[in-house]
Image (tube, rainbow, N blue to C red):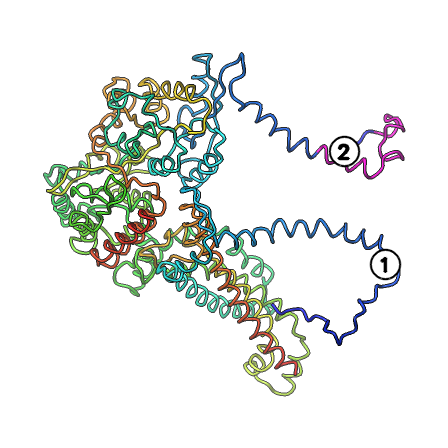
């Protein structure tokens, strides 16, 4: 996230190249270069080229079916800025990312705190906790499709049985509930993953701190707020960052459950990009959409990065 | 793999002993890799290189995967055995349920313009796209007007792009109205002919507690929503797009009336649950075959499900009629199904057409109907007693397919349908039918005129 500091190379700086470590002659260097070549080659092919191609495509009007393919500058992005569907998808995606990440972090923290304590059967619980995360998302989607079915779903049945609702809730067919329901499915699926990351963070905090705090008469609450949480903060932020970046690309749940509907209320940037790229075969415009996604993700990452650095500096200094 | 014991290999032949340098090894490895990758390519080139001087003309045929008692490759083999001039190599694409993948593969193959595949099958909504791109060869000179008259009229309309026949109908599917014979009998009603009748029938079924749901259809923001809308709109004598492919008529009064009716089924007459807004084919089929609904709009596949006692409580209690219409129009059924096409870049068009002629003979259509479950596109096949014996239900669908109506015919259909799905869904959930259709109109105009 942060640029690697480079050695100043102005006129005032020593003009000598960095001294070569002794024993590394030209032949050895060539061997080193040769050995690195496969790595660099692979990275170039699988990572750099697609990104580069995505950028160039986003500046063209390439559409397979109409056979157009010419350079049009930033026109795709101009269209995008005035496209209500894009902004709607953008807002949905941000909303989904914010709400699901927040819920997953808070619930995940709770789960991690419980699983950190010693109790009977902890190993089993820790292992089985990961089951939702290990289920393929398409299966999760189908499962939640059945659970939250508006007419015959068990959720409506239970809610009605406990008199929490009067009439069946139309989970996927109403604009108010569809995105919420997808958030619920995502929280169920991904909270264990957050819990696992945070559990690892908790385990890295030295147990002596707990003893010291107790000796000094701190309550468990104080111990959590004053010692554990600040020490856990870097892990927490990194886990939340990973989760947010992942949540931002949400595709399978809305694709399977709602197809973006009703009335575009669950259209996310990924599903919209997929529709333009693979159903419409508009490679140019679709790539511009993907670029817009990439830029938004970059902003999220930078936001988290800056926050994280500040925290680290504050606690370190 | 078992390593040979040291003694059986003569020392000189062992590459690792001394003689083999690293370069030799790399060379050998490179040749091995090149051989495994290049081999099939070379083989593929040699088989698809067209007619050799002596053997039959080689052509390739790509199709989505359909199967029943027989599969496609068995039928293609039969053609190969029936004559010696043409040999068809069958290339299987994903099943039609993976429509997006089938479409992608075809576009990639056709855009190469290398003549492979010579013959392909296409969903009805891709015809204009492939014709507009110049990938589908015009077939007018091969199939005379009397050849064309053998097909249902809506099919030929869907296969025609800018006055030219660019596809040949293969099999047909369309939307139809399923009804519960027992419920209608108990109510003393006939199957509805108009949408107003349908509302009354559905309300009667619900108020007399014969069914939880009066009428089920598909309102999920997906392709099927466009199909349903085409049926409602065409049955009010309206259209989404005029046949010229440029004039957008989705905000005209007939279309507004039709979409308003769709909205009213949920919010005003309440014959449909709001859940239809998230339902596509299967979620809307399940309540019907489990006895919860009186009426259902769906495709022909539901018949088999309804007659299967292991998953249906309504075996023998289901009837099918053409969909109702508004007073101003007549019954319309959204046209589905696949059609044949000939690659414009094919070097063996005559052979391709010979294959198509064989495939579209009534005898083959009958075979597709009885063994693969694909409804014939030629009206005369429905009068064949063999079909009546093997599949009486399919035979009864002739009246449905006569009303088959194509979806908007435009090469930009993939983009147009995304607009339609989004705006129709908005109209149905938010209730501002006129506003949403007006928005759809201006967006579609921007697409088709670009």
**Foreground: B178 or A314?**
A314
Q: Is residue B191 magenta?
A: no
Q: From the top left corner, tell me how far across and down residue B11 is, in percent.
A: 90, 29
| Residue at the disc numbered 1 | A24
Q: In terms of secondary structure, where does tag 1 sit?
A: loop
Task: Name the image quarter holding residue B326.
Answer: top left
In this view, B224 is above or below B122: below
Q: Residue furthest bottom?
A: A216
What residue is rendered at 61% in x and 71% in y? A202
What residue is rendered at 33% in x and 18% in y? B361
Q: Which residues are magenta?
A: B5-32
Would you say residue B292 is visible in this rendering?
Answer: no
**Foreground: A152 or B32?**
B32
Q: Residues within 10 Å of mark 1 (few under 14, many from 20)?
A: few
Would you say residue B97 is visible in this rendering?
Answer: yes
Task: Point out which mark residue B28 bears.
Answer: 2
């Amino acid at each position: 996230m942060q640029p690697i500091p480079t050695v100043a190379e102005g006129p005032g700086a020593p003009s000598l190249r960095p001294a070569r470590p002794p024993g590394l002659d030209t032949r050895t260097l060539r061997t080193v270069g040769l050995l690195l070549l496969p790595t660099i080659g692979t990275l170039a092919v699988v990572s750099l080229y697609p990104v580069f191609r995505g950028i160039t495509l986003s500046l063209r009007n390439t559409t397979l079916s109409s056979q157009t393919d010419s350079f049009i500058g930033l026109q795709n992005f101009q269209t995008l800025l005035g496209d209500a569907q894009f902004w709607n998808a953008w807002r949905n995606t941000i909303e989904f990312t914010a709400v699901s990440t927040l819920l997953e972090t808070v619930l995940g923290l709770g789960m991690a705190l419980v699983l950190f304590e010693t109790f009977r059967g902890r190993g089993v619980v820790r292992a089985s906790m990961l089951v939702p995360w290990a289920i393929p998302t398409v299966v999760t989607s189908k499962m939640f499709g059945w659970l939250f079915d508006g007419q015959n779903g068990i959720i409506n049945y239970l809610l009605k049985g406990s008199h929490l609702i009067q009439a069946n809730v139309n989970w996927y067919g109403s604009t108010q509930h569809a995105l919420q329901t997808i958030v619920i499915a995502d929280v169920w699926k991904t909270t264990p993953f957050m819990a696992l990351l945070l559990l690892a963070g908790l385990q890295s905090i030295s147990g002596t701190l707990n003893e010291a705090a107790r000796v000094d008469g701190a309550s468990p609450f104080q111990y959590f707020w004053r010692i554990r949480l600040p020490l856990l903060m870097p892990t927490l932020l990194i886990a939340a960052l990973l989760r947010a970046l992942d949540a931002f690309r949400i595709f399978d749940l809305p694709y399977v459950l709602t197809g973006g509907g009703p009335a575009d209320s669950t259209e996310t940037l990924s599903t919209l990009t997929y529709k333009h790229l693979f159903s419409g075969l508009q490679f140019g415009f679709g790539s511009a959409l993907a670029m817009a996604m990439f830029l938004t993700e970059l902003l999220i990452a930078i936001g988290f990065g800056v926050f994280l650095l500040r925290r680290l500096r504050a606690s370190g200094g | 793999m078992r390593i040979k014991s040291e003694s059986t290999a003569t020392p000189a032949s062992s590459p690792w002993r001394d003689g083999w340098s690293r370069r030799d090894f790399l060379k050998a490895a490179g040749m091995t890799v090149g051989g495994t990758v290049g081999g099939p390519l070379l083989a593929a080139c040699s088989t698809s290189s067209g007619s050799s001087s002596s053997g039959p003309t080689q052509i390739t045929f790509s199709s989505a995967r359909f199967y029943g008692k027989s599969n496609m490759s068995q039928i293609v083999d039969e053609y190969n055995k029936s004559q010696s001039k043409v040999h068809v190599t069958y290339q299987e694409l994903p099943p039609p349920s993976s429509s997006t993948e089938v479409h992608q593969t075809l576009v990639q193959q056709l855009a190469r313009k290398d003549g492979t595949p010579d013959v392909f099958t296409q969903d009805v909504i891709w015809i204009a796209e492939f014709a507009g791109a110049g990938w589908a060869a015009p077939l007018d000179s091969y199939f005379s007007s009397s050849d064309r008259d053998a097909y249902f009229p809506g099919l030929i309309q869907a296969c025609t792009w800018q006055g030219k026949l660019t596809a040949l109908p293969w099999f047909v599917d369309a939307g139809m109205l399923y009804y519960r014979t027992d419920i209608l009998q108990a109510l003393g009603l006939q199957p509805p002919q108009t949408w107003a009748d349908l509302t009354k029938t559905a309300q009667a079924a619900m108020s007399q507690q014969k069914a939880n749901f009066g009428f089920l259809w598909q309102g999920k923001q997906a392709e099927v929503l466009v199909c349903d809308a085409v049926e409602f709109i065409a049955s009010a004598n309206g259209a989404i797009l005029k046949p010229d492919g440029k004039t957008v008529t989705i905000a005209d009064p007939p279309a507004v009336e039709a979409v308003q009716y769709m909205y009213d089924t949920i919010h005003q007459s309440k014959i449909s649950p709001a859940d239809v807004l998230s339902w596509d084919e299967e979620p809307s089929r399940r309540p019907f075959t489990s006895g919860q609904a009186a009426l259902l709009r769906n495709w022909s596949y539901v018949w088999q499900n309804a007659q299967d006692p292991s998953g249906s409580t309504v075996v023998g209690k289901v009837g099918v009629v053409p969909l109702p219409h508004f007073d101003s129009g007549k019954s319309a059924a959204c046209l589905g199904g696949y059609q044949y096409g000939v690659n414009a870049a094919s070097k063996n068009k005559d052979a391709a057409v010979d294959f198509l002629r064989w495939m579209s003979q009534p005898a083959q259509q009958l075979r597709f109907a009885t063994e693969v479950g694909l409804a014939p596109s030629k009206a005369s096949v429905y009068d064949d007693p063999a079909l009546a014996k093997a599949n009486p239900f399919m035979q009864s669908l002739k009246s449905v397919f006569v009303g088959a109506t194509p979806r908007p015919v435009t090469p930009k259909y993939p983009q147009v349908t995304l607009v339609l799905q989004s705006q129709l869904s908005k109209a149905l959930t938010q209730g501002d039918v006129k506003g949403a259709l007006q928005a759809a109109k201006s967006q579609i105009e921007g697409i088709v005129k670009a």
